[in-house]
Amino acid sequence: MNLIFIDETGLTLTKYNFKMWRKNHQEILEGTSGNGKNKINLIMAIDKNEIIYGQYYKNETITNIEFLDFLKELINKIGEDKYKNSIFTVDNAMYHKSDKINKFVMNTD
């Protein structure tokens, strides 16, 4: 059985001001970060040995549509045999749990 980890991250190239707060409303950090323009979102699939597959999206938000396309390409890359013998781990992002993704996963044998 193969264990495959999938996760996303976003990188920005332009700056904006931000503040971070603790639960007790005390400010803990102030600085700059990206504003969504010139943003690159990455999705990567890795196993214990290597990066299996990755995609990037420039100035696009990742939704269930992009995630579904990523899953289809990942399955195509690794092949049906490895796909059927793999466990995929994802975090709790809303688009991971969408009806579209659930239908795809349940219908892919």
Image (spheres, rainbow, N blue to C red):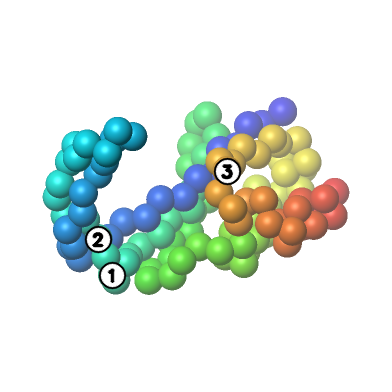
Q: Quadrant of residue 72?
A: bottom right
Which amino acid, by three-letter code, is at mark 2?
Gly
Which amino acid, by three-letter code, is at mark 3?
Asn
Q: In front: mark 1 or mark 3?
A: 3
- SS at circle 1: loop
**Residue bearing mark 3:** 92
Q: Is residue 52 positioned above or below 102 on the image?
A: above
**Residue bearing mark 1:** 38
Image point 84% across, 54% down: which residue? 107
- SS at circle 2: loop
* Circle on res. 1: none
Q: Quadrant of residue 103?
A: bottom right
- Locate residue 13 relative to residue 23 in the image: left or right: left
Q: Tell me whether circle 1 and circle 2 mark residues in contact (CB < 8 Å).
A: yes
Q: Point out the tag, 2 or 3, that comes first from the N-terminus.
A: 2
Q: Is residue 24 positioned above or below 95 on the image?
A: above
* Label tally: 3
**Residue bearing mark 2:** 34
